[in-house]
């Protein structure tokens, strides 16, 4: 199956330093800080979340190989903005605490 040419994200949905909550996968339910974005792939790196052990060989002199833990990218569709006043991930950040309650009550 040929890989469809997905357009790169036109606009960054998240930015570095944002608090986000993961809603799917291994790190589901966890929150963290956005480290880096890959707009082409639509993925995020989140600090100390979704860690994988990377086995590396020393390639250049002075570089040591071994197993190092590193963050693996998570697709933005698996991530929500984290709202501190709601204490949960939300699709859209609420400006006022009142709106948070409103959102909560409306949610089925
Ligand atoms: Zn909120």
Image (cartoon, rainbow, N blue to C red):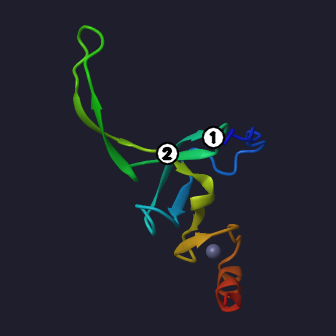
Q: Position of residue 47 (x, y in %)?
A: 42, 48
In the image, what residue occupies the spot 40% across and 61% down?
A: 26
In the image, taking residue 77 as reference, residue 34 lies left or right, namely left
| Nearer to me, 19 or 108 | 108
Give residue 31's position: percent from left, percent from top.
46, 62
Residue position for label 2: 73
Q: Residue at x 70, y 45 (%)?
A: 12
64 up-or-down from 52: above or below: above
Residue at image position (54%, 70%) is 84
Question: CA separation, marks 1 and 2?
Answer: 9 Å
In the depicted structure, whether residue 103 falls above or below residue 1: below
Residue 34 shown left or right of residue 27 in the figure: right
Task: From the viewer's side, name the closer residue of 105 and 64.
Answer: 64
Q: Secondary structure at mark 1?
A: loop
- Check whether the beta carbons of the residues at disc 1 and disc 2 lie within 8 A of each other: yes
- Check disc 1 and report the residue beneath it: 41
Mark 1: C-beta under 8 Å from nearest atom of ligand 1: no
Question: Residue at 51% of width from left, 65% of height from top?
Answer: 24
Q: Position of residue 21 (x, y in %)?
A: 52, 64
Q: Secondary structure at mark 2?
A: loop
């Amino acid at each position: 199956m040929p890989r469809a040419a997905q357009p790169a994200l036109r606009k960054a949905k998240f930015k570095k330093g944002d608090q986000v909550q993961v809603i799917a996968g291994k790190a589901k339910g966890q929150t963290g800080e956005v480290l880096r974005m890959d707009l082409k792939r639509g993925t995020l790196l989140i600090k100390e979340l979704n860690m994988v052990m990377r086995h590396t060989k020393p390639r250049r002199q002075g570089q040591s190989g071994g197993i190092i833990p590193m963050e693996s990218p998570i697709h933005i569709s698996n991530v929500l903005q984290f709202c501190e006043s709601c204490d949960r991930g939300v699709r859209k950040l609420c400006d006022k605490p009142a709106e948070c309650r409103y959102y909560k009550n409306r949610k089925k």
